[in-house]
Image (cartoon, rainbow, N blue to C red):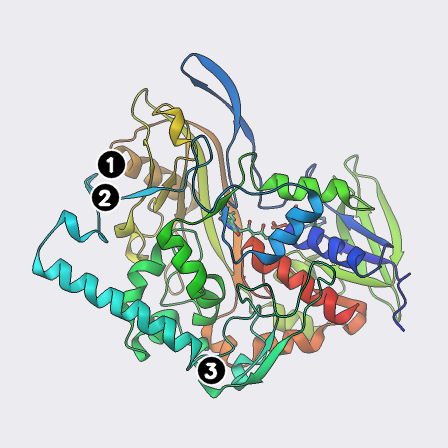
Amino acid sequence: MANKDLRVCIIGGGPAGLSAAMYLEKKGYENYVVYEKLNRVGGKCYSPLIEVTHNGVTEKKSFETGAIMGAITYHAVHEMEEFGGYHHCGPYWKEKEPNMRREFRKVTGEVYEPFNPKTDFSLRKVKGLLKLKKQMKKLNKLMQTKYVGYDCYGHLRIAEGKYYGISKGVEGYCGATKENSFPNYIEGVNENLKDLALPFSEFCKKNKVSEVMRIWIAPFTSFGYGYFDEIPASLVMKYLDVTTALEFVKMGLWTWPEGTQQIYEHVNKKLKHPAVLETEVVKVERPEGKVIVTIRDKEGKESVETFDRLLVTTPLDHFKDFADATEEEKELFSKIVHEKYCDYIATFEPGMSPDISGYMVDNMVPERLGHAMVYYNRWQYLGRDCPCTVYALRNHTGDPDVSYEDTMRMMDEDMSKVGFPIKEKLYAQEVYYCPHVSCEDFASGWYDKLEALQGNKNTFYAGEIISFGDMEDTCAASKDIVGRFF
Ligand SMILES: Cc1cc2nc3c(=O)[nH]c(=O)nc-3n(C[C@H](O)[C@H](O)[C@H](O)COP(=O)(O)OP(=O)(O)OC[C@H]3O[C@@H](n4cnc5c(N)ncnc54)[C@H](O)[C@@H]3O)c2cc1C
């Protein structure tokens, strides 16, 4: 019989930490504390309000510095919405809602339509589109036949040619109902799944579907998740499973008018124990049977709390910096790498801001590291003087990083070149993004080694590393960890 009085410490008040708290409550555990070092919850879902003027009216609108969108496959996020009472718009856009419509722009500024045969009747283009369509269909079929089991959260057992996890199926996850959120798991053996450890580009080549990368690249690389020659196919297919990828193609996406941060603010308000803000976990010691946590408040005052269990949702490669990490933990977590994703919100010279969002696909290759890959005009109906967000990646395996300063400069230059000169940056950041391991470490069973550590020293690991660095995968990972271990 589980002891539901266990005192649980959750480090981090982002999507992973708050979903862990919610799922603990759903299972009857109410003796938990969430520590969040910032003065707000939501982590990388940060949606500041910015004043904009339209038709002579000045009002505050939400802008996204982090997460922007979801899709019908966002089951765990939907559970958070239901719990918090704050829901998305979409999947299809309505007037005055945040708009995900995008154009494609060459780095020279020219707009083109790579997937519209009507704009260019050349035989080459039509043939290319037919090939793409055929390969999309082929990949869809392969994922449902050759790669049965790929569409569950996490990467457990894939390196051994098996699968185990919560199904991502659209019909609700595998046995979950409104009354009982904790689903059954799917599991099985499928040697072919080992291919998911390959870099996505090799995976596509092996399956003779390389054309599909033309579709997958925009919502993957420009969203900061890395390049297809370095990221294990498993990560790509967990995030952009065929259903989600098709929703991108159809632009059937969810958005949140007050910003994704509000999903988590609302959940936090409904929790029995809202996150303790401006409180950083600065030390963790785990003697036999206990977890002793030192916290520092905003005045710099330190105090010590004792818990029975620890749930870590913050970057595991930084765990050793404040915790008594074991040699095994140090060794395993040292293999984690992350993307260095930069973005800023900027205003543009009068009348010269983008009127819709845009992809710059030519910049989504390692040779163009540090260049602007996408710009997001969230409030298209407000016209051309609205601020937009611009994004770039500054790292790629095997290449030297481009410095943050050079990245910011190159992003400005790129925007000018395509006709959108930046006037002022209102907010700029680089984030620790999409933690993962190399294809080699993936193939040698890194995720199963992490699984073997779950529960050691009363510690559980959740967050982006478990499955993928998006809201859905992080919330579902909490559901999985709470569901199986509590
Ligand atoms: C630019 C950008 C675009 C994105 N777009 C999308 C999108 O469109 N759709 C989507 O689904 N996802 C998107 N994401 C990803 C999504 O935001 C993240 O995957 C998600 O926020 C991860 O949640 P998390 O709780 O694991 O980590 P985080 O969000 O990073 O939260 C971790 C929290 O822990 C806190 N913390 C860290 N250390 C400590 C400590 N020692 N003590 C106390 N607190 C601590 C941090 O302050 C933070 O609040 C995007 C992210 C970015 C940056």
Mark 3 lies on a secondary structure that is helix
Residue at 61% over, 70% down: 174
Mark 2 lies on a secondary structure that is loop
Residue at 40% over, 64% down: 397
Question: Is the C terminus in the top left, top right, bottom left or bottom right quadrant?
Answer: bottom right
The residue labelled by disc 1 is 418
At which x and y percent is residue 430? 50, 45
Please, what is the three-letter code of the amino acid marked with disc 3?
Lys
**Which residue is more in the foreground, 127 or 93?**
93
Q: Earlier in the sequence, mark 2 or mark 3?
A: 2
Ligand 1 within 8 A of label 3's CB? no
- Marks 2 and 1: CB-CB under 8 Å? yes
- Marks 1 and 3: CB-CB under 8 Å? no
Bin the neighbour count of mark 1 within 10 Å (Cα to Cα): few under 14, some 14-19, many 20 and up: some
**Which residue is more in the foreground, 208 or 363?**
208
Ligand 1 within 8 A of label 2's CB? no
The residue labelled by disc 3 is 194
The residue labelled by disc 2 is 107
